Image (cartoon, rainbow, N blue to C red):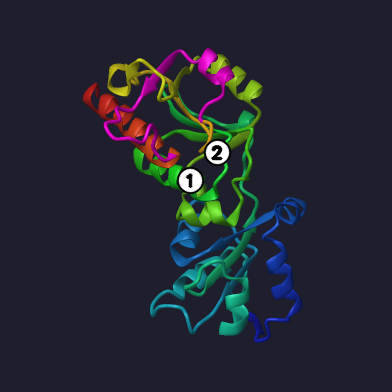
């Protein structure tokens, strides 16, 4: 199963992995990185076929090596890496010994199949990979049909998005496109747009999420732009009783998603 063993942090393959931290390099190669046992396990469960698996036995927990065998069965090259070399390619301060090169995450808006009564989350201009990843984890847990990034600042294949999502970027359909195209896509699919803003008069509990619905959240600093607020069918706000006038965007998305889940569960 092991074709190569790498001991030196200066090895050319280690240097190439480090370059994949740059989006341009990932896009040109058509790949991204998945770090972590749980993340890689979800990727495999989602049907991903890794190209290479880099593992460090000194960091790996007993009983986890079966994952490398499963990846090898799908055609992945399995490479053992020394602790020093692995620390150079790892994103985490305390790596668990797993890193994979996988095909780029598909983010084609036209390829989304969201079903007859979808719940969709739209992230408009969200900048921080950690927030996008956290929104994906919520979407996976809440059974959201898709998460769409509009006018994206980062990409779905950003290793920090994958890490923050715990690998759910491979279990939740995602897309990325411009605001104009996404708004047209919503109209074409007869999906109601619910926009979140602290300035809304209506509380989120007063909105109807039972039909085909897209929940839109905006950037960390500015929220949703005027174009989105003007095009929305409903504006909603989360009740706030402290001095802060807004929540972290991932937290806000989770609250609104679960209000939609509550309503849909109650209505059967």
- Observer-nearest of 51 and 214: 214
185 shown above or below 100: above
- Occupied quadrant, residue 264: top left
Q: Residue at x 44, y 47 (%)?
A: 134
Q: What range is drawn magenta here?
A: 223-248
Residue 200: x and y in percent read: 39, 18
**Quarter of the picture holding the N terminus:** bottom right
Residue 27: x and y in percent read: 73, 50
Horizontally, residue 180 falls left or right of residue 172, namely: right
Q: Name the residue under label 1.
A: 131
Callout 2: SS: loop
Q: Are marks 1 and 2 in contact (CB under 8 Å)?
A: yes
86 shown above or below 251: below
Magenta span: helix, strand or loop, mainly? loop
Residue 178: x and y in percent read: 66, 28
- Observer-nearest of 93 and 80: 93
- The furthest residue to the left: 266
Specify the label residue 126 is tagged with.
2
**Quarter of the picture holding the C terminus:** top left
Question: Is 85 part of what is drawn in magenta?
Answer: no
Tag 2 or tag 1, which sits nearer the N-term? 2
Q: Do we see residue 13 in this rendering?
A: yes
Mark 2 Cα-neighbour bin, 10 Å: few <14, some 14–19, many ≥20: many
């Amino acid at each position: 199963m092991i074709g190569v063993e790498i001991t030196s942090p200066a090895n050319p393959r280690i240097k190439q992995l480090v370059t994949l931290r740059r989006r341009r390099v990932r896009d040109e190669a058509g790949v991204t990185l998945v770090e972590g046992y749980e993340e890689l396990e979800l990727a495999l469960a989602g049907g991903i076929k890794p190209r290479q698996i880099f593992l460090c036995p000194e960091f790996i927990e007993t009983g986890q090596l079966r994952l490398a065998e499963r990846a090898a069965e799908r055609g992945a090259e399995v490479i053992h890496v020394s602790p020093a070399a692995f620390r150079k390619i790892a994103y985490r301060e305390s790596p668990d010994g797993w890193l994979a090169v996988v095909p780029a995450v598909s983010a084609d808006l036209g390829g989304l199949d969201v079903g007859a009564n979808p719940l969709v989350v739209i992230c408009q201009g969200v900048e921080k990979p950690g927030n996008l990843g956290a929104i994906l984890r919520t979407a996976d847990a809440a059974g959201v049909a898709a998460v769409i990034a509009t006018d994206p600042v980062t990409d779905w294949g950003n290793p920090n998005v994958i890490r923050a999502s715990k690998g759910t970027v491979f279990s939740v359909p995602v897309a990325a496109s411009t605001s104009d195209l996404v708004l047209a896509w919503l109209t074409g699919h007869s999906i109601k747009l619910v926009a979140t803003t602290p300035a809304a008069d209506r509380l989120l509990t007063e909105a109807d999420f039972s039909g085909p619905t897209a929940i839109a959240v905006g950037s960390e600093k500015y929220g949703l732009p005027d174009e989105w607020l003007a095009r929305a069918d409903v504006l909603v706000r989360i009740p706030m009783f402290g001095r802060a006038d807004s929540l972290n965007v991932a937290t806000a998305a989770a609250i609104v998603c679960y209000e939609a889940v509550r309503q849909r569960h109650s209505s059967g």
